Amino acid sequence: MTVRWPMRFGSFISPIHSPDENPNLAIHQDIALIQHMDALGYDEVWMGEHHSTGWEYVGSPEVFLSYAAARTNRIKLGTGVVSLPYHSPYHVAERVTLLDHLSRGRLIFGVGPGALAYDAYQFGLRSDELRPRMEESLDIILALLRGERVTRRTDWFDLRDAKIQLRPYSQPGFEIAVTCTTSPAGPKLAGRHGISMLSLNATQVAGMSTLGNNWEVAEEQAAKHGTSVDRRNWRLVGPMHIAETEEQARRDVRHGLPKWIYYNTKVGTLGLVPESASTSDHYVDALKENAFAVIGTPADAIAQIERLWDLSGGFGAFLFWAHDWANTEATRRSYELFAKYVAPAFQGRIESLRESEEHALRHRAELAPQAAAARLKATEAYAAEKANENQRRVGN
């Protein structure tokens, strides 16, 4: 593969935490992870919105990210995502504009229909109502963010000559991204409005098979509506845990992988491993076999990103799907190894160093003897100088 631009890296935090653990501690551990990423030079982090199941319990990414903004310096902060069907579009526009100001321009506004069917049921909505509502809401939000006055009455919101008072801090505006899975709904919306795409579960078999098609849909819609889309603003999400060796990575994930598998196969609906799998090693084998996750070394992480690049035709950012597979120390080490050995391979930061090393190796046979001769000459000259000084002292 040939990366045509520096790639960005970050983390997509749902978050998924076991209900057996202290939720307050878990939330603050997420903040600590973001601070760790900020110090390591990661580009962005995303926080989700969920309202049910007992495992994903951040109900407002905007509130969470405003707290994170005050405790970080440079990392961009993405709502991952605001579930538009559950909110008045006016209130969403106001909240994200305020977050843009509080973070001083570090906001990425991610939108989606809502991931959990349990959430929709709780709010009295059917799953087939969510995407139409999302599209309707986004139209209004974009108009409000442009500073327009909006009058619109629907069966779930009523706006009368409405305009948000505060203009965004970012000019001409902050980045907006729509989530994509296996359906064409997200790519259609991205192309229509000329906004970014965020492909969740991009490493799942169904997700991988639709990556190229999703981009084709986005480009087709952009051409139809006179907008443009840019692969550099396309993000892919997938889980990883890396260590110095695969054996160490396998040992690390025994801490929490079984709980994560339980949630996603019994409470959630991903169905990532066969029913016969029953141990952590079985789960690792299944996740590696279907290429959903990397549980291994930095070299394995590089290979996964290269594979995704080839399948998709190119994208701009890769995000870890954050998890509690390992304990805090091993998790932080995984992010550190990635920042040290994986990210630079896709950011143009090591090619010149390698070229410089190769240049030195090519000329070593020629230059090393010259350097040795120069050192010998300098040594001999110093010895002669000392001998002359000694002779002068004796003569005096």
Image: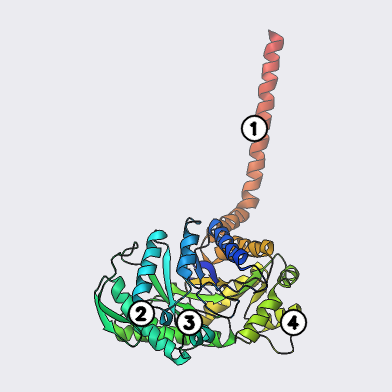
- Distance CA(mark 4)–CA(mark 1): 65 Å
Tag 3 and tag 2, C-beta contact below 8 Å: no
Within 10 Å of disc 1 (Cα), the crowding (few <14, some 14-19, many 20+) is few
Q: Marks 3 and 2, how far apart in space?
A: 14 Å
Looking at marks 3 and 2 on the same chain, the residue that comes earlier in the sequence is marked by 3
Mark 3: secondary structure: loop
Q: How many marks?
A: 4
Q: Residue 306's image quarter?
A: bottom right
Q: Which quadrant holds residue 299?
A: bottom right
Amino acid, disc 3: Gly
Q: Is residue 195 visible?
A: yes
Q: Which mark is residue 378?
A: 1
Going from N to C along the chain, the mark reached first, 4 or 1, is 4
Q: Quadrant of the C terminus?
A: top right
Q: Earlier in the sequence, mark 2 or mark 1?
A: 2
Tell me if label 4 and label 1 are in contact, CB under 8 Å.
Answer: no
Q: Which residue is mark 4?
A: 282
Q: Is residue 136 left or right of residue 342?
A: left
- Point out the frontmost of discs 2 and 4: 2
Q: Which class describes the residues within 10 Å of circle 2: few (<14), some (14-19), or many (20+)?
A: many
Looking at the rendered structure, the kind of residue marked 1 is Ala
Considering only vertical position in the picture, is 388 above or below 294? above
